[in-house]
Amino acid sequence: MAVVQPPKGRSAITRYRTERAFSSGESLLECRLGTGRTHQIRVHMTYLGHPLIGDRTYGRNTNARLKRLSAKKAETIQLFSRQALHAQLLGFVHPTRHVPLRFKSALPHDMIALIETMEDV
């Protein structure tokens, strides 16, 4: 559950792309996992210097990070009650029937509100 160099660590691949970049420095990302390690997205994004909003374990809402935001954005981030992480699409091959399965989930209301706040100028 940390970024370590081989041979001590196991390989983990996260592909990501920026969906939206907000003027305050936050971004909405789409992540695609090439592996399924515990906390993989959270660890990789923090390692790259872009921790998830609301991640109290790996992320840091430092004063310096919050000071560059408007009061409304800083308050929204501080009050966000969970990790800003959502599995929109999950897929795998069924272990006994060997058929591909896909499950989709709409973005929750609290994350929609968070994105709308980040979009405010």
Image: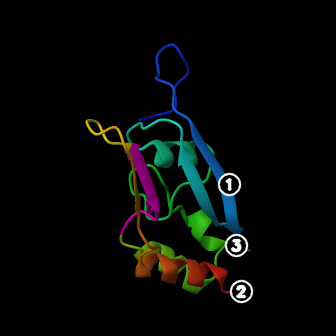
Q: Is 119 positioned to the left or the right of 110 in the image? A: right
Which residue corresponds to mark 2?
A: 121
What crowding class fits label 2: few (fewer than 14 Cα within 10 Å), some (14-19), or many (20 or more)? Answer: few
Circle 3 crowding by C-alpha within 10 Å: few under 14, some 14–19, many from 20: few
The kind of residue on which mark 2 rests is Val
Q: Nearer the viewer, mark 1 or mark 3?
A: 1
Q: Where does the N terminus fall, quadrant-wise?
A: top left
Q: Position of residue 40 (x, y in %)?
A: 46, 42
**Of 65 and 96, the residue lying toward us:** 96
Q: Position of residue 93 (x, y in %)?
A: 38, 41
Q: Nearer the viewer, residue 3 or 96?
A: 96
Task: Please say if 43 is above or below 84.
Answer: above
Magenta includes 89?
A: yes
Question: Which residue lies under the disc numbered 3?
Answer: 22
Work out how far the residue at label 3 is from the one at label 2, CA to CA, in angstroms: 9 Å
Label 1 is placed on what type of residue? Arg
- Quickly name the residue at label 1: 17
Helix, strand or loop status at disc 3 = loop
Question: Taking 80 as reference, is 12 above or below it?
Answer: above
Question: Of the residues under marks 1 and 3, which one precedes in the sequence?
Answer: 1
Outermost top residue: 7
| Residue mark closest to the camera, 1 vs 2 | 1
Q: Which residues are magenta?
A: 82-92
Q: Is 36 placed left or right of 34 in the picture?
A: left
Q: Quadrant of residue 87?
A: bottom left
Discs 1, 2 touching: Cβ within 8 Å: no
Query: What is the x, y in percent for residue 11?
Result: 51, 26
Q: Assign a secondary structure to mark 1.
A: strand
Q: Provide the secondary structure element on which disc 2 rests.
A: loop
Residue in the picture at 57% in, 52% down: 31
Give the mark nearer the N terminus: 1 vs 2.
Answer: 1
Identified at 56% across, 86% down, the residue is 72
